[in-house]
Image (cartoon, rainbow, N blue to C red):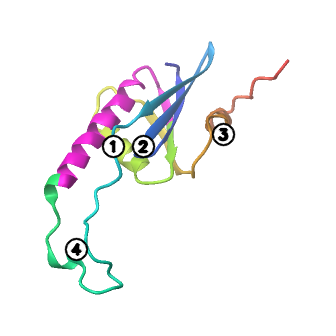
Amino acid sequence: MGDKAGVWIDHREASIIALTSDGVHTTLIQSKIQKHPERSGDSPLKGSYEALQVRADDRRQRALTRELNIYYDGVIAALTNCENLIIFGPGEAKNELHKRMAKTKPRPSIVAVETEDKMTGRQIAAKVRAYFGLAAPRGR
């Protein structure tokens, strides 16, 4: 990839926009993670709620953490030649990726971690170009 890149990430997918001398390159990485596991049981509004009665199932949480680590490692592998990086997204995935990247060598210089809502591919590319001060390509 190029010198500068941006990653929009949540727990389901990551869109990587790399700005190179050849232009803008987009990579989409899907996670294999299903919805976050929740406890089944009665509604807390209707009375006895299982989460209050039974300890949490750590096995499900460990499995989720393992799957997230595999996903984050795939994103990090796609950023091998990146020197400057901006990470953004709606939830905790951006912070989890940032912490995971801090443990890798060599790692890109993370210039910002920002909160952004759901974005289209064009919006993501425009944000990355604007952040690094590059103009959008003109149509013919």
Distance Cα–Cα, label 3 vs label 4: 40 Å
Residue 118 vs residue 113, the one in the foreground: 118
Looking at the rendered image, the disc whose residue lies closer to the viewer, 3 or 4, is 4
Distance Cα–Cα, label 1 vs label 4: 23 Å
Q: Earlier in the sequence, mark 3 or mark 2?
A: 2
Mark linked to residue 33: 1
Mark linked to residue 12: 2
Residue located at (16% from left, 78% from top): 53
Instruction: Report helix, strand or loop for mark 4.
Output: helix
Residue located at (25% from left, 48% from top): 64
Q: Which residues are magenta?
A: 60-85
The image quarter containing residue 105 is: top left
Residue 27 vs residue 45, the one in the foreground: 45
Q: Would residue 124 be found to the left or right of residue 102 on screen?
A: right
Give yes or no for contact between labels 1 and 3 (Cβ–Cβ under 8 Å): no
Give yes or no for contact between labels 1 and 2 (Cβ–Cβ under 8 Å): yes
Kindly identify the amino acid type of the residue bearing the numbered disc 3: Gln
**View extreme (right): residue:** 140
Kindly identify the amino acid type of the residue bearing the numbered disc 4: Ala
Residue matched to label 4: 51
Percent position (x, y) of residue 119? 60, 44
Mark linked to residue 123: 3
